[in-house]
Image (cartoon, helix red, strand yellow):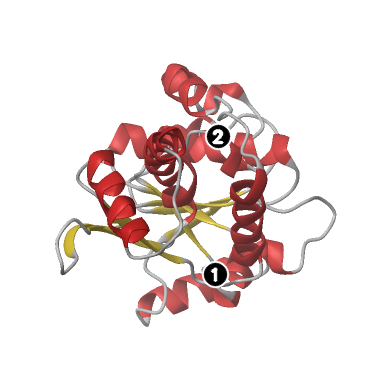
Amino acid sequence: MIAVRIIGGLGNQMFQYAAARRLSVVHRVPLELDLSGFRTYHLHRGFRLGHFFLPGEVCFRNRGYLAALLSERATSLVRNSLAVLGLVRRRIVREQHFHFDQEILALGDDVYLDGYWQSPKYFSEVDHVIRGEFKVRDPLVGKNLEFAKRIEDWKTRGYLIEIVYLRLASPQLALRRIASRVRQGGHNVPRADVLRRFKRGWTNFLDVYQPLADHWAIYENSESKPKLLERGP
């Protein structure tokens, strides 16, 4: 797995993501975004990449104080000693200067990048992938926008986010359940709203909430007992 420390404003975060994403694409391994630095970094508005179409193989972690300490302050002797003891297995690569470093392109498939990596040469090989993933989603509105912002804030504070999505087989089943509820004295929902929410709810889960979750699960809720369909990451 490739991991990268995400910190700074939106521009910095995009370069950090792109450099690490190139390694994950080349090696065909997942990418982990370390958000732990935002616990003490308050110059900008926290994690901002959640507005883009980040793929499902990108996961988010608050790796904790040890990883942040190692990436920022520990000497190579300390890191190597911890590696020998089995406490740290992933190679930590810290940016040595702000010029393009050709050696970064040759890194293996299990590294932790700590730096700003502000050169397009770090990801030009997969530029088409990066451009596709940096497309801005349709803006969220109302409660969806409020809740997405809450999740992003919780993640920067170190919370672990787990989301369970209950899915029905079809919008027609949702309409039948609503009709049954109405016959029993419950409230109605207009057909157009049901159809719109059915599609938008699934899209928002895939594009917004699933990428933000540390763990997620999808259940089929068409029968009397929910059935697990998929779990990740």
For badge 1, the amino acid type reads: Ala
Instruction: Give the spatial CA distance, label 1 vs label 2.
Output: 26 Å
For badge 2, the amino acid type reads: Phe
Q: Nearer the viewer, residue 77 or 95?
A: 95
Give me the residue at 48% from left, 19% from top.
127
The image shows residue 143, relative to residue 81, as above or below, that is: above
Q: Disc 1 or disc 2, which is closer to the eye?
A: 2
Left or right: 92 in relation to 28: right
Q: Nearer the viewer, residue 189 or 132?
A: 189
Give me the residue at 48% from left, 33% from top.
53
Left or right: 213 in relation to 182: right
- Residue 26 location in percent, x, y? 32, 32
The image shows residue 142, relative to residue 91, as above or below, that is: above
Give me the residue at 15% from left, 67% from top.
224
Residue tagged 2: 52
- Residue 121 location in percent, x, y? 55, 22
The image shows residue 181, relative to residue 51, as above or below, that is: below
Dot label at residue 67: 1
Give me the residue at 37% from left, 77% from top.
84
Q: Nearer the viewer, residue 207 or 32?
A: 207
Q: Quadrant of residue 24?
A: top left
- Residue 103 location in percent, x, y? 48, 35
The image shows residue 86, relative to residue 95, as above or below, that is: below
